[in-house]
Image (cartoon, rainbow, N blue to C red):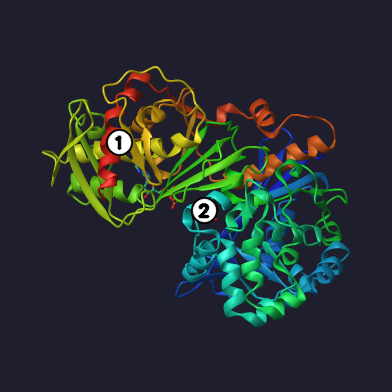
Amino acid sequence: MKFPKVVPYYFGFDLSTQQLKCLAINDKLKIVHSETIEFDTELPHYHTEKGVYINGGRVESPVAMWLEALDLVLTKYQNAGFPFEQVHGISGSCQQHGSVFWTPEADNLLYNGVAIGTGNSLLEQVGPNALSRPTAPNWQDHSTSNQCQEMENIVGGPVRMANLTGSKGHLRFTGPQILKIAEEEPQAYNSTGSITLVSNFLSSILCGELFPLEEADACGMNLYDIRNRRLDPSLLELIDGVNPKALQTKRLLDKLKGEPIKSENSARPLGVIGNYFVEKYKFPINCNIFPFTGDNLATICSLPLEKNDILVSLGTSTTVLLVTDQYHPSPNYHLFTHPTIPGEYMGMICYCNGSLAREGVRNELNQDGSNDWTLFNEAVMDPSVNTSNELGIYFPLGEIVPSVNATIKRVIFDETSGEIQQEIEQFTDKRHDAKCIVESQALSCRVRIAPLLSSTRSSINHPSMGQSVSFDYDKNTPLETYLEKRPQRVFFVGGASKNDAIVNKFAEVLGATKGNYRLDTPNSCALGGCFKALWSDLIGKNVIDSSFDRFLQQHFDWNELEHICDSDTDQWASYTNKIVALSQLESAL
Ligand code: ADP
Ligand code: XUL
């Protein structure tokens, strides 16, 4: 039988920009089934393109489409003969920052339509009357520069905003989005009874009750005071003050259903699945719904990541996710509360120039228009391509970290001190660009993650010691600081992680103390949701009492990961002078 009926199953949803996925695992953490609804093709009557409507800087998604998608994805499970009655728990992840605006009637509509309701479709049950705005702003929206400015002004600028909320003001973050709607759509804002993120939208729909935010995802709003663990009163007041009429009805704190659900309560069920799903799909009445979180946050829950472990996603852009106990905020990256490990954080660094910049160098080398990486890879691995006194930065697109316009620069530096000697137009051989781009991309990651790592060890002697270096807002830091910190393990994912030359070079520069791994998974966020549902269910039934990270360490199937290599300490140390050169080069941009 395809789905043995005695086995407990767990669902992990992933509501992303272009699709809704539902993944099922068994209690041995093995994926047993997966179904997906592609919005553009399977729900064409919404006329979305890549899941969204774009109108100038405004990027939004229709909420009704998500409701339809939820019924459709479960119908696919039904058609596959999936034993819903064996689903013990559900959690999941959703695109971050999006917001759903509900009418004051939504609580009743959800309760009657989902919690006790039967029949019809979810869309008919909940209905358009539950929404005060038919669309939800999407994370690609960039129409809120005025609001980011207003919010940063209130708290005292980007550095203070990052200190307070884990990120400087960002166009896509939910606080500026809500402020914009309060300012520009007073009617919709005044008729809004509740506001959820996409994560608590989906968990609320599954239970038939509107729940507060989940703490880790709430960190993507520019509203949450991470250290004091509460929504910041001055920022809430700014939004409440826009429209005195709204103030008379309901304050933002009430619209958000009060303070977020804290990470130490993340294993507690929000409630059981609504009767609508029990009747229609035959879920058991005691199937628990656990808090959903943001997609990047769920990704770190898909791996047995410990403090100082990092995940490098080498996709179109480069994204670094890491688990840290250091609250070291910076306007250049994001910090979120960890969704399942109290007292820890997730750091997220997003670079714009990743694969596309490497492709540019590859194309220069190939010269025949081919997409083959052979010449590029040979150059990266060839010891005779000596770049020990060369550094190049390659930003064909404006870069986020450091925050600069598009630029490409090549320099020669003094190998002993790291001091830059001269800027040059071209290296003698284009093969040097291949090695230099990978080295500088990896080195940029290395210096940005360093403040977020806990000290590992430092015993290297180097002629450049005693110097200080500056990266972004971390000014004049002793070079030694960058030599005390090494990641524990590095996990590579994304398109370019297939490339051995690239990942080996990254591994050399980053210097993980416990090895480098490659993971090929298109399912990470949904899988993180499944793992969270399983862990929470076992905690609730007193089967285990271990923390989420310990549980995954014990039960994760390490065969899913490919061990690529171990990093060599001497090679890692040999990049010290390049750190000095990189600091000088970036400071001059
Ligand atoms: P996305 O971020 O859009 O999900 P992917 O993770 O699929 O993208 O990564 C796409 C990128 O991976 C492409 O831009 C391509 O340059 C890069 N890539 C794919 N295969 C290789 C390879 N063998 N070597 C280097 N880069 C590769
Ligand atoms: C993160 C972000 C995106 C979305 C994608 O800050 O905006 O990664 O979460 O779904």
Which residue reaches farthest left? 428
> Is residue 137 something that shows in the picture?
no
Determine crowd level at label 2: few under 14, some 14-19, many 20+ residues with C-alpha closer than 10 A: many
Say which mark, if any, is on residue 221. none
User: Mark 2 is on which residue type?
Assistant: Arg
- Residue 360 percent coordinates (x, y): 26, 50
Determine crowd level at label 1: few under 14, some 14-19, many 20+ residues with C-alpha closer than 10 A: many
Circle 1: element type: helix
Q: Is residue 383 left or right of residue 528?
A: left
- Residue 4 percent coordinates (x, y): 77, 38
Q: Is residue 478 left or right of residue 76?
A: left
The residue at label 2 has a CB less than 8 Å from ligand 2: no
Q: Where is mark 1, residue-wise?
A: 439
Q: Where is mark 2, residue-wise?
A: 160
Q: CA distance from mark 2 to mark 1?
A: 32 Å
Residue at the spot x=18%, y=29% of the render? 386
> Is residue 225 something that shows in the picture?
yes
Circle 2: element type: helix
- Residue 250 percent coordinates (x, y): 75, 72
Q: Would you place residue 363 above or below residue 138 in this image?
A: above
Residue at the spot x=65%, y=37% of the render? 343
